[in-house]
Image (cartoon, helix red, strand yellow):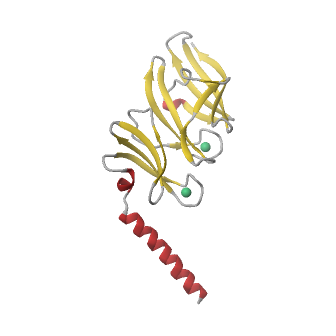
Amino acid sequence: MIFLILILLLAGASCKKEERAAEVSLQDIIGPGAFIKDQISLDIDEDKDKEDIVLYVLAGRFYLAVVDQIKVKSKVELLTEQADVILPKDFNGDGKEFEFAFNAFDSGKGIYVEIIGWNKNTKELLRYNFYKDEDILEELFVSSINDIKYENGFLIQSYYSDVEPIGFFTNYYSFSEEKQGFEFEKSEKTAD
Ligand SMILES: [Ca+2]
Ligand SMILES: [Ca+2]
């Protein structure tokens, strides 16, 4: 009898969830006029229920949002003007693929890449800053989106600079939980 009640309860709970999902679409939640470019399912707040991670354009601006069953839980306006896909990666070395990189814009030295992460304390998306000493680096993070990886405790970024100093460089950053960003560690010239 208890089993039967449990089964009925479980069936009821899953029906309710499907109903809610069917009557409120992602488009309804994001809002009219938004053009959804990509979406993935990910349990980003680690409560055993998956959220929708949504990349969308509204009035010419790009956004990345975390959406649960009924509402936008967090969103961040992106710098990018050309993103098409969401590719979750582990860029901070915690073993969880909860970071998202986008080509932001062309700079004089290459492509500026932004990394959006998830702050598990505030439960919000944020754009990670890059720090050198206490200053926020604006120029150094220049790379192709494919030339960023996390390895051996560092976020490693390779790029070619055609302005002085000219050559191929590799930069190393460590993730700071406290700053919720990356701290510059060192730069190595790998080729002329
Ligand atoms: Ca969740
Ligand atoms: Ca991670």
Percent coordinates x, y for residue 58 in the rendering = 35, 41
121 w.r.t. 19: above or below: above
21 w.r.t. 14: above or below: above
Percent coordinates x, y for residue 70 in the rendering = 44, 59
Q: Residue at x 38, y 32 (%)?
A: 81
- Horizontal side of 126 relative to 79 (left or right) equals right
Q: Give the farthest residue toward the left.
A: 33
Q: Residue at x 50, y 11 (%)?
A: 163
Q: Give the farthest residue toward the top.
A: 164
Image quadrant where one finds the C terminus: top right
Q: Quadrant of ligand 2?
A: top right
Q: Residue at x 55, y 86 (%)?
A: 4
117 w.r.t. 113: above or below: below
Percent coordinates x, y for residue 36 in the rendering = 36, 47
Image quadrant where one finds the N terminus: bottom right
Q: Disc count in the image?
A: 0
- Nearest the camera: 51 or 189? 51
- Horizontal side of 52 relative to 180 (left or right) equals left
Quadrant for residue 105, please give it. top left
Quadrant for residue 138, please give it. top right
123 w.r.t. 146: above or below: below
